[in-house]
Image (cartoon, rainbow, N blue to C red):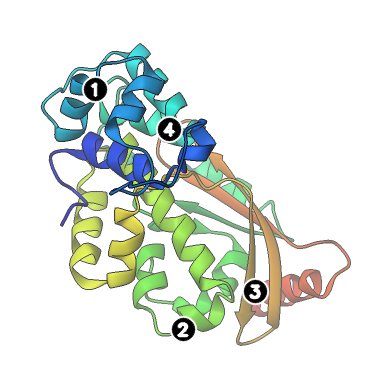
Amino acid sequence: MSGMSSNKLGEFLRAHRARLDPAEAGLAGGGNRRVAGLRREEVAVLSGVSADYYARLEQGRERNPSAQVLTAIGRALRLDADARGHLHRLAGLTPGLSPDRSRDVVHPALLRLLDSFPATAAYVLSPAFDVLATNTVAAALLAPFRGTDNMIRVLFEHPAARTVFVEWDVVVASTVHALRLNAGYSPADPAIHGLVEEFLASSDEFRRLWNDQTVGGLTRAYKVFAHPLVGRVELTYQTFDVRDAPGQQLLVGAPEPGTASADAVALLGSRHAA
């Protein structure tokens, strides 16, 4: 499996080079191209490095690129901000987060904050997407998955996941891409490592998404639920980093005021409280 190999930098570069259309980079496409996307030599030219140097980077024979070189390569490959940061972390140019059990403990002040969002679904995730804490609405929204407290396991293993998450394929893609981003921030995290290795071995869909090498943080997202008690619930989520527990994230999903989804959220909260 290529997920947790020793040449993560090379695999990341190779995957992003393969998906870039030559026309996007101002190069002629078509012809007798034997590989998808750009050739190594073309990335080298666009980045201002030698073809031999770039080849050694992809092959894992060059382990100490400078920040300037990686910035140039990221620009040539049209990487977004998340992907550029991930590229630098793979090369060891940005310090990663060390495993810390405190990231699995939610501060009492944050627990109180969760309960201050009565009209939203609010919950805290660990770097490996364990659900560490929920408010009343989130607990009711996730009740169909009671007993499974990791969102990767919910999405790929729970029999209700494809029904409850109306746009399951969109949700799983963004979640796996965010897990890869977290793995770059926390390369020594045993929970992330174990989860990735397990699902690379057990899930074809996870393996496809992981090996795609796409990274992206959980930012603003629109999710649709088909809840067994209240029906369709549409929420817009915002994600916030928990600064005093690096790696934890707070997700808050709110319905549009005055909609059926707002009524459903209110009902979920009251049912759960009852």
Cα gap from disc 2 to disc 1, whole angstroms: 50 Å
Q: Which quadrant of the structure image shows residue 150? A: bottom left
Element assignment for label 1: helix
Cα gap from disc 1 to disc 4, whole angstroms: 15 Å
The residue nearer to you, when weighing 99 against 270, is 99
Residue 7 rendering spot, x and y as whole percentages: 16, 38
Q: Depth-wise, is mark 3 or mark 4 nearer the camera?
A: 4
The residue nearer to you, when weighing 92 against 263, is 92
The residue where tag 4 is placed is 77
Amino acid identity at mark 1: Ala
The residue nearer to you, when weighing 125 against 81, is 81
The residue where tag 1 is placed is 51
Q: Earlier in the sequence, mark 2 or mark 1?
A: 1
Residue at x-position 37% and y-position 41%: 16
Cα gap from disc 3 to disc 4, whole angstroms: 51 Å
Q: Earlier in the sequence, mark 1 or mark 4?
A: 1
Q: Which quadrant of the structure image shows residue 151? A: bottom left
The residue where tag 3 is placed is 273
Q: Is residue 191 above or below residue 208?
A: above
> In screen coordinates, is 179 left or right of 143?
left
Residue 66 rendering spot, x and y as whole percentages: 28, 13
Name, please, the residue furthest toward the right: 258
The residue where tag 2 is placed is 160
Q: Earlier in the sequence, mark 4 or mark 2?
A: 4
> In screen coordinates, is 47 left or right of 101?
right
Q: Depth-wise, is mark 2 or mark 1 nearer the camera?
A: 1
Residue at x-position 15% and y-position 22%: 62
Amino acid identity at mark 3: Ala
Amino acid identity at mark 4: Leu
